[in-house]
Amino acid sequence: MTKDYSILIGGAAGQGSRKAGLIIAKLLSEFGYRIFIYDDYQSLIRGGHSFSQIRASKSNVLSHREKIDFLLALDETTIKKHQADLDKKGIIIYNSDEVSLKKKNAVGVAMETIVKKAGGTPIMGNTALVAAFAKIIGIDWKTLEKLLKKELKKFQELNLKIAEEAFSSTKNLVKIEKLDQKPLPLLTGNEAVALGVVKAGLIFYIAYPMTPATGILHYLAKHKKDFNIKVAQLENEVGVVNAALGAAYAGARTMVGTSGGGFALMTEGLSLAAQSETPLVVIESQRMSPGTGVATYNGQGDLLFVLTAGHGDILRFVIAPGDADEACFWAGKILNLSWKYQTPSILLIDKEVSESTFSFDTGILDEVKCEKSLLWDKKGKYLRYKKTRNGISPLAFPGEKNVIVKANSYEHDEFGITVEDEKEVEEMQNKRLKKFEEMRKEADKLPAVNVYGKKSAKKAIIAWGSTKGPAKEAAEKLGIKMIQPVIVEPFPEKQMKNALKGVKKIALVETNGLGQMEKVLNCYGIKVDKKVLKYNARPFLPGEIEKKLRKF
Amino acid sequence: MELNTYAKNTWCPGCGNFGILIALKQAISSLVGKGIAKEKMVMVSGIGCSSKIIDYLNLNSFSSLHGRPIISAEGIKLGNPGLEVIVFAGDGGTYNEGISHLIHAAKRNIDITVLIHDNRSFALTTSQFTATSPKGFKGKSTPEGSIEEPLNPLKLMLASNATFIARGYSSKTEHLRDLIIEGVQHKGFSFIEILQPCISFFNTFQFYNTRVYKAKEDNLISKKEALKKIEEWDYNKNNTRIPIGIFYKIQKPTYEKSLFKDFDSFKGENKVDLKQVLK
């Protein structure tokens, strides 16, 4: 077998397919494989159909693929829904107490009988399935036992009893090779974002729950003691953003997180951040929009919205990382940038980045620093909005001796007193515009555009955010170039044009219906020859892109 | 102590806001005398005539958006719990646009002081009805008179579990000064509703002068007693007296103290070992 496995485990919500999937991924990660888990679940708590698709490969993988090698079915629906995707040599592992399959390569596990015999509860059927799978692929009992002990703290003895019974009553069928690679920790994109900002000096995280950004709130709340940070859930997103601005004014590095609908409510705060020059970082994790959309599924439809959100001239950074490593690095970077330029910033991710699980390169954490902001030198009278050569006024915070810090949502003078006079208004506007020139230069110095695939190719894919993963894989298979703009605002025009040198044909791949990135590219004179769009709330698979671009 | 700035005052002559400004400055001087450092005080305002007050004060200030000063102030307090945060907001901003923030701030008992300049009308937008305008209020959007009955904000605060509820009157500056001092010193959410005539659009000066009286401040921990005082006037009737003073005051743990009990403040890079957490 090739060293690139695809395992799908599914069941009704409440049957524990996600947890079981994570344990399977960790087993394979222990064997040196690089992991990607796609989690597909509905907006319900019990019933329905949810599944995790785990990909384990020798090299880094950033998306799941069409064909499944192992189909692990906690219920009959899973078999019906996914057996068509099973590889010819694939294996189905199913609950033989519920269904009977008369197929070759189908292994029944008497889940209910085993669980009942041990005196467990129905959800523990997932433990039986995991253990049976481990045996089938040739993982030894000791390795499995060690991991289960770490992962299942509740009813551990009972779970181990179930696992042992399922393990010993199943036959080994294949042997998965152990790779000579160090295991990496498995993290969701949301968790990677959290680590990045904590490393960059985050003090305060404020949010209102909204899928798919809620994981950041959960992770930071769970670890607030470990990370030594403050976490609060407030009444609504309008409250969240305005409290964040207050906290930043008081000197605390603060971040907020939400999805498109919550971000829509936050836009007044974006505008206040711009006018009052208060640092603000918003994590916008997109889901299928508009409206409530498809709440737990993917989409990249908020690009144009985040680029223009808020009333008035707003200078902002918009950065769209495409996987967990990038999410960690850029989350830290954007917090630093926001504080350096005292401006609002948006880290634009999506369900695929937020909730998928990745093998995380901990070395990224060494690349994230807490960069110091420009602070007042304590000379003369403090002016919050002092006009400087580059438009950046030194920061001071209330509570400091001999300092009066006046922040204002009205147009203001250097001290912060409201003004309406035409000359003063224009001068302050100019001060802020100067900052934008600096931000542009800064973006040019950063690795704002990534290039993958065949560098000399005349054909290129442009894809952003989580579409990077499948697009990169497709480009490598097709032998063409793949270009990923990571910073979208200020747009890294020079780096993009460099990346496009020698390229004669461009295909744009993204998961929205309008081809929103095309509009951005057009602003810089870049024309797209073909658009490959997907808007059924599911991410692209590498094979889909490959098929659509074979004749391109 | 110089509390004035160079900003030109643009309130209408005779505006009730002047009384509030006088009371506030006296309260600030007194609080500084009691040991609260001037640099630790932060004034937060929203939008409207009331909110111009921060331009006239030589103190730290944050001018927020319409309806948002309370939640901005909460952010400031949470960002640095060592600060003393005072909010100036109008009835339109607080009881119309941003009412959810008022309720939640009271519910969580965050240690800030909120002063509501209640002139019972939108004045800076040249007269429309607000949540505390009496039924029949003739503003430019309700030329035949408002059809809505007013809200009693003190009753709302009592229901929201505010731990300090008081009412003052802008023309009784010494009394108001003392309310502000008490409110700032109260550990928890302090709500001070200030009756304020709007000389241009809703001149209630004579109305209040003949009705306002200082209520006896006893049994302040009784919700029942508080409700009696609060219900004496419903913001609608003309035939009752209007009590002012502290109506309710109890002690409860503050939000920020409970929320941040494990937080150990630091500057610059967070020294925690993240790789350890990943193990």
Image: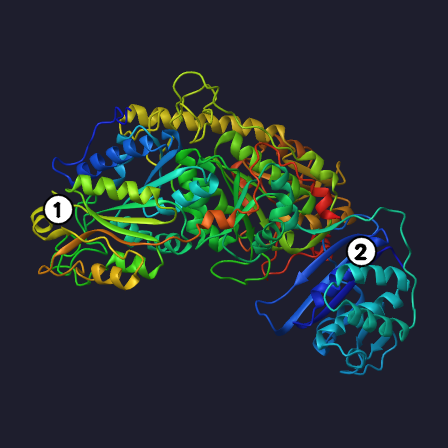
Give residue A198's position: percent from left, percent from top.
61, 41
Question: What colouring does the structure picture have?
Answer: rainbow
Residue under mark 2: which chain is it in?
Answer: A
| Residue located beneath label 2 in the image | A56
- Do the dots labelled 2 and 1 sit on one chain? no
Q: Identify the element where label 1 is drawn.
A: loop
Mark 2 vs mark 1, CA separation in Å: 72 Å
Which numbered disc covers residue B201? 1
A164 and B12: which is toward the camera: A164
Residue B49 in sight: no
Q: Picture coordinates of residue A170 (x, y %)?
A: 89, 73
Element class at badge 2: strand
* Label ID, residue A101: none
The answer, for residue A100, to whether it is visible in the render is: yes
Q: Amino acid at mark 2?
A: Ala
Dot 2, how many residues are within 10 Å of its Cα: few (below 14), some (14-19), or many (20+)? many
A394 shown above or below A161: above
Is residue B273 rendered to the left or right of residue A511? right
Residue sitting farthest toward the front: B218
Q: Amino acid at mark 1?
A: Phe
Q: Where is the N terminus of chain A found, in terms of image quarters?
A: bottom right
Residue at image position (77%, 53%) is A35
Q: Left or right? Give the position of A238 relative to B246.
A: right
